[in-house]
Amino acid sequence: MIIMSLAQLLYRSESESLDFKRSQYPFVSADDRTKSELLKDILAMANSWRTEPAHILIGIDASAHPPQVAGITNHFDDAILQQFVNGKTQRPLKFSYYAAELQGLPIGVIEIPVQSRPIFLKKDYGKLKANTVYIRRGSSTDEASPDEIALMGAKSATLKDSDIQIHFAIPASREIKGNQVHFDSHIFHIKEGDNIPDFRPPPPKDIFYVPDRISKPNIDFYRELVQGVTQNYLLQKVALTVTNNGTLAAKEIRIEFVLPDQNRIWEFCDESDFVTEVPKRYKSFYDDNLLRITAARRNGEPGYEFCYIDGQWHLTFEFGYLQPGRTLWPALEFYVGARQTGTVSLQGRVMADGLPAAATCKVEFSAKVTESETSLGELMQNYDAAMEPDESD
């Protein structure tokens, strides 16, 4: 099982297992209604559907992106906090409070391991009701439904470690290809290096020429051309899917990989960052003013996120809900490339509601890399041949 460091948690979103608090909870001299907010957050985290320890990080400003360390000036006494919580619940709630340091500033950490549920109060306290199961959903707290409470108590209603299997796939034919994929990457070395000039159109031959007010020269045309060509040869499209081999439905399937890559030999890219449009010498006025709306992935729907942080790739795949015996189609398609021939094996962890602990998985990327040198002039010759007669300048 991969354990996330506190520093790595800053790059994750608030969820059923993570919450950020800007300031320390009021406790000493606070009234019951105020202290019940702390109690509610701990109960909700303890009852949440998760397969990893939950953390409440105190002293983190979540309004910034990524969240910023703000620090705190006072800490709880763990023994007093334990007595406060466990004196009110119907069964012992396992958790701990400890002081830590991030980016040179003090923070507080409440850590709550996965444990038997449900856990609730024996008597009303502050704003909280007795015999009510509070649960964390995403970044908010709610009351659990009767069906959820019944499932919490059904220890047999769990998935097995081997139930969720990940595979590479060919989406068009829905063919499963196992956990290994091979691809070819080609690296173009541009002779001009980083000295790619701005695009400056030649002066018009017609002295009576009137500039077109709808379009303007694209000064980044040459750079966009180089970026598009080099990226399209470096990266290749691959696809991942999952199969639920168990007898129970799996909800909120999440698979995470961490790849140490100090020299950034490997490259991962999603659909939105892959260049598919051919650059133009001239841009329409509307290109710069058109409102572009990217649809956010709704909770539970398939999606993925790639981040390169401090010499490591963090790859996260969200596969959502999957019924027993079903493989997820369409598969999640993304792009991968390499700058050096070789193979890398990624050990990951699999999480899902109903899975009692994070399971492990493995995928392997194998790349053959070739290299060549070209110039901006050669790229332009190919560009002009391909665009004729679609674009005339």
Image (tube, rainbow, N blue to C red):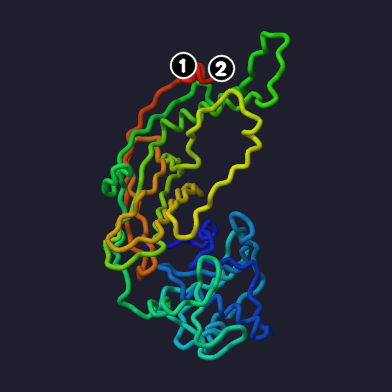
Q: Considering only order in the chain, which callout, 1 or 2, is on the residue closer to the N terminus?
A: 1
Q: Residue at x 46, y 88 (%)?
A: 90
Q: CA distance from mark 2 to mark 1?
A: 11 Å
**Residue at numbered disc 2:** 392
Q: Quick check: 296 above or below 130?
A: above
- Classify 138 as above or below 133: above
* Relative image position of residue 66 (x, y in whole percent): 59, 55
Instruction: Provide residue 228's location: percent of width, then percent of height.
Output: 49, 30
- Identify which residue, 6 or 282, lies in the foreground: 282
Task: Give the x, y percent position of residue 19.
Answer: 55, 67
The three-letter amino acid code for the residue at tag 1 is Ala
Q: Is residue 106 left or right of residue 207?
A: left
Provide the secondary structure element on which disc 2 rests: loop
- Residue 339 is labelled as none
Horizontal arrangement in the rendering, residue 236 relative to residue 19 (left or right): left
Observer-nearest residue: 155 or 26?
A: 155
Helix, strand or loop status at disc 1: helix
Residue furthest to the bottom: 123
**Residue where numbered disc 1 is placed:** 385
Within 10 angstroms of label 2, few (less than 14), some, or many (20 or more) residues? few
The one of 285 and 235 positioned closer to us in this rendering: 285
Q: Residues within 10 Å of mark 1 (few under 14, many from 20)?
A: few
